[in-house]
Image (cartoon, rainbow, N blue to C red):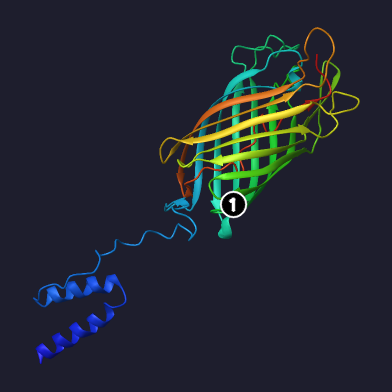
Amino acid sequence: MYSSIRNGSYWVLALLALFSTEECCALSKMRNRFNQKPAPCPTPCPPPAPPSCCPPCCDEPIFYCSRMPFEIDFTLALDDFRSLPEGSWNGNWGAYSALNLKAFLPMNFTAQVAGSYGLYDWTGRAFAPTNNSKSLQQQGFITAAASYESPCSGVNAGVAYDWMLNKNFGLFAVNPFFDQIRGQLGYLIRGGHEIGAWASYGIRISHEESQNVPLQFRGISQANLFYCYYFKNHGYGMVWAGSPYRRGLLYKSGRPGDYIFGVQFAAPMTEYLTIEGHGAYMGPRGWSGITPSKNFASDIAIAITYSFGKRRVRQSPYMTLANNGNFMVDTNQNF
């Protein structure tokens, strides 16, 4: 009777082996259990299936799998910027730290909140017309954003609300606070190429006063076309060019600058560390005379970021924390 049961089990497993390699390997192990010579498998036993982090059209996972359901990024950066509130004086050199929290939602949507805090003019500011010349300039950004990213190819889109907070800011060393809205729309082509546009709109005018001089500050509204390439090492490089499109505060008519161009990149060094950087420049309006106009804005920064938790394998420019390149400042007074 035992022999009948054994032979019956063998033939049932033999029928199952016709349908998959895994059952064939199970049959081989079963026959070994009954002290019979294992039957050869047509192919090696398959490895355990990886986590389902990869859609059918992609060759590799989208996320680094983690028990933590969201992404945390901590950044340290060196930064040099200037804007119209500096007038004809030099810019501001310093450093900042940033924290970014990102949650991945169903259907490829993402929500995030991020903030940064920076200290500038470490050796003082000789150009400040007040007794704040030896005080450090402090600056912070806060960004709340949502985005949608195609896993392989298709439309990418994002929108962000940015705040800028300052202490001892600009030529007059005042403390303005203002905001902007920012959006980005692109189309990702197979092979890692993306083209699109991004724009910002300054919302609030911050009113300050120094030495009985009324001052106004607002984010410069700008519109740009961009090209982004995603490298095989999961980094990216992005360039853009465009122009301010709203009347400036410093002039009775016309825009605050003639043109804008910028770059941004991310280069992963390990699974957790990434070198990042950005740079932007807004050319001054047409001028006449011997001395070139210094009513321009610029920003250049280099940073290292440590990331952990559930996060995308491929780095992305959607939606980066506000900085002095994508949040330039307009004013009504300088010299």
Tag 1's secondary structure? loop
In the current view of this chain or complex, which residue is farthest to the top?
290
Percent x, y for residue 63?
46, 51
Residue in the foreground of this view, choosing between 36 and 145: 36
Quarter the N terminus occupies: bottom left
Residue in the foreground of this view, choosing between 203 and 52: 52
Left or right of 273, for residue 146? right
Percent x, y for residue 304?
49, 31
Residue 156 in the image: above or below residue 7: above
Quarter the C terminus occupies: top right
Q: Which of the 4 image quarters holds residue 173?
A: top right
Left or right of 123, for residue 59? left
Left or right of 206, for residue 186? left
Residue type highlighted by circle 1: Glu
Residue 174 in the image: above or below residue 28: above
Q: Which residue is mark 1?
A: 149
Residue in the foreground of this view, choosing between 313 and 75: 313
Percent x, y for residue 27?
21, 75
| Residue drawn where x is 63% and y is 12% of the image | 124
How many C-alpha atoms fall within 10 Å of the one at disc 1: few (<14), some, or many (≥20)? Answer: many
